Image (cartoon, rainbow, N blue to C red):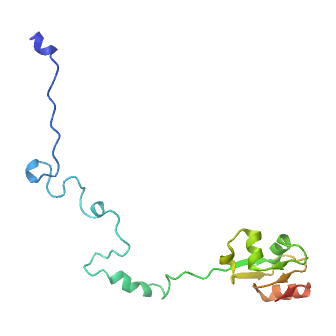
Amino acid sequence: MEILNQLKKITTKKQKRVGRGYGSGAGGHTTGRGAKGDKVRGKTKITFDGTKIKKGWIKRTPFLRGKHRTLPLPHGYTYNLGDLDRFYQSGDTVSPKTLAQKTGIDEKILTGRVKILSDGKLTKTLKYEGVKFSQKAKNLIISGGGKID
């Protein structure tokens, strides 16, 4: 008996073969793949409707809280007179190109989208090209000696 206790174990369990039918003892066709639903499919698409015809969501989209709601909104950039007084020296030209250089925003984004508002004090005479104004800002600029093209 002492000899049997000193022998090294050589038996190892076989690894379970998964996914080889119902007879393997480890399930059937879904073996090792989780359950049903999102676990199997991964991420479901935003257009997933749960029906055979996948057009339902796409057809309803324009009418969900107003038409054209998925289009990008036009975005404008506003600057106050106080900002311009800080950025520019007297006699400089204010345009989308020079504003892009001063603020670090891409010039293509600023073109046609800049509006000057009347907040702050403007102590310098500047020239303006290619920008829009609020009525009050326009009056303050003209009364201060600025030129609008």
> Residue 15: x, y in percent?
17, 40
Q: Nearer the viewer, residue 146 or 117?
A: 146
Q: Quadrant of residue 45?
A: bottom left
> Residue 133: x, y in percent?
77, 86
Q: Quadrant of residue 76?
A: bottom right
Q: Is residue 126 left or right of residue 8?
A: right
* Residue sitting at x 19%, y 54%: 31
Residue at the outermost top position? 2
* Residue sitting at x 14%, y 52%: 27
Q: Which image quarter holds the N terminus?
A: top left
* Residue sitting at x 84%, y 75%: 120
Q: Which image quarter holds the C terminus?
A: bottom right
Q: Is residue 1 left or right of residue 95?
A: left
Q: Quadrant of residue 48?
A: bottom left
* Residue sitting at x 26%, y 78%: 51
> Residue 35: x, y in percent?
24, 58
When the figure is inspected, residue 44 is found, relative to residue 91, above or below; the finding is above
Q: Is residue 4 left or right of residue 118?
A: left
> Residue 18: x, y in percent?
17, 48
The total of numbered circles placed on residues is 0
Q: Is residue 46 left or right of residue 3?
A: right
